[in-house]
Image (cartoon, rainbow, N blue to C red):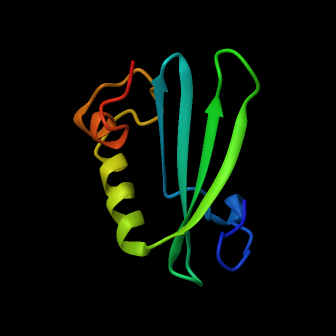
């Protein structure tokens, strides 16, 4: 994974993995968003993974995302005790996925 602004490689072995990740199920498909923070650029990069019930998986990278917006989303995700659980319906999951979960 690389920074969407400067192209720096995020080294998971050096502790540069995602700051936060969250999964949710929408219409039978699983969506997983992972936020990476670049210490050089001070922006976030979002990796979106879409695991389709019918069809091929898809992974996209978005960004750069401002530090303010990224910090807000990471804080929201961290409010969930089980962000990896696509069936979780806690307030953080519902807000993050805008009430669109199955």
The residue sitting at 36% across, 28% down in the picture is: 100
The residue sitting at 65% across, 28% down in the picture is: 51
Q: In this view, does 67 lie to the left or right of 90?
A: right
Quadrant assignment for the C terminus: top left
Residue closest to the eye, 22 or 12: 22
Total residue callouts:
0
Task: Name the outermost residue toward the left.
Answer: 91
Quarter location, residue 6: bottom right
Task: State the image coordinates of residue 47 (x, y, percent, origin top left).
Answer: 61, 51
The residue sitting at 54% across, 33% down in the picture is: 31
Task: State the image coordinates of residue 86 (x, y, percent, origin top left).
Answer: 46, 25
Task: Name the outermost residue toward the bottom.
Answer: 40
Q: Is residue 28 left or right of residue 5?
A: left
Task: State the image coordinates of residue 85 (x, y, percent, origin top left).
Answer: 45, 27
Q: In this view, does 52 lie above or below 33?
A: above
Quadrant assignment for the N terminus: bottom right
Q: Is residue 16 left or right of residue 69?
A: right
Residue closest to the eye, 18 or 24: 24
Q: Is residue 20 above or below residue 56?
A: below
The residue sitting at 66% across, 69% down in the picture is: 4
């Amino acid at each position: 994974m690389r920074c969407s602004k400067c192209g720096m490689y995020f080294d998971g072995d050096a502790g540069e993995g995602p700051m936060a990740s969250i999964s949710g199920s929408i219409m039978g498909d699983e969506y997983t968003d992972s936020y990476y923070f670049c210490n050089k650029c001070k922006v976030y990069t979002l990796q979106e993974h879409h695991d389709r019930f019918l069809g091929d998986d898809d992974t996209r990278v978005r960004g750069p995302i401002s530090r303010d917006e990224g910090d807000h989303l990471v804080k929201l995700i961290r409010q969930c005790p089980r962000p990896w659980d696509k069936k979780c319906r806690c307030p953080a999951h519902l807000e993050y996925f805008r009430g669109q979960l199955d």
